[in-house]
Image: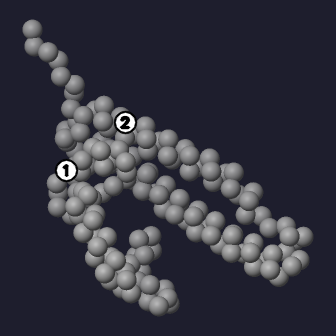
Amino acid sequence: MEKKTKKRHAGYLTLKQLGTLREKLLAEKERILNKETTDRARYHLDIEELSDPVDEASANMQASQEIRFATRETFLLKKINSTLLKLDDPEFGKCEECDSEIGFERLLARPVANQCITCKEESESVEKSNFFDRRSKSLGKTLSELGRP
């Protein structure tokens, strides 16, 4: 009698692998959403804490850094939602640059990855070499367009 094989996704990933990626994405999404609700209270600055200019500067710097981290988390949340929608597409897991398969290990480490490791390393190398003309990943503007040197 012929041994049953696991059903495969129309792409190269198995249904089990896709399920594992879906679980990982949903867990990360939940972590971000839960963190967002607990962090809201931390953004509130008490007027008593700001009586000293040094304390005020420190609080402003910390709030600025926390907002920057929150922006990164929001960007990641958008990528997670986008990836969750793409999971059932047979093209999911293919590199957007060279169309080769992104290894399952890479997707497991970074489920929102849209480039194979070779293309990602090349793109990071180009980005590092073009320091003054690099683009903001979240806004799509060059640093000079944002008024930064």
To which residue does mark 1 refer? 101
Q: Element under label 1?
A: loop
| Left or right for 107, reference 139 | left
Separation of disc 1 and disc 2 at Cα? 17 Å
Q: Residue at x 62, y 47 (%)?
A: 34
Circles 1, 2 touching at the beta carbon (< 8 Å): no
To which residue does mark 2 refer? 20
Picture quarter with the N terminus: top left
- Find the residue positioned furthest to the top: 1
Q: Residues within 10 Å of mark 2 (few under 14, many from 20)?
A: few
The image quarter containing residue 24 is top left
Residue 131 is situated, as x and y percent measured from the top left of the image, at 37, 83
Above or below: residue 145 compared with residue 61: below
Residue 74 is situated, as x and y percent measured from the top left of the image, at 53, 60
Q: Residue at x 57, y 64 (%)?
A: 69
Observer able to see residue 89: no
| Left or right for 115, reference 43 | left
Q: Residues within 10 Å of mark 1 (few under 14, many from 20)?
A: some
Q: Residue at x 86, y 79 (%)?
A: 52
The image quarter containing residue 100 is bottom left
| Disc 1 residue type (three-letter) | Glu
Above or below: residue 94 compared with residue 126: above
| Left or right for 138, reference 52 | left
Q: Element under label 2?
A: helix
- Find the residue positioned furthest to the left: 1
In this rendering, the count of numbered labels is 2
| Left or right for 55, reference 86 | right
| Disc 2 residue type (three-letter) | Thr
Reading the chain from its start, which is encountered first: label 1 or label 2? 2
Above or below: residue 93 compared with residue 42: above
Point out which mark residue 35 bears: none
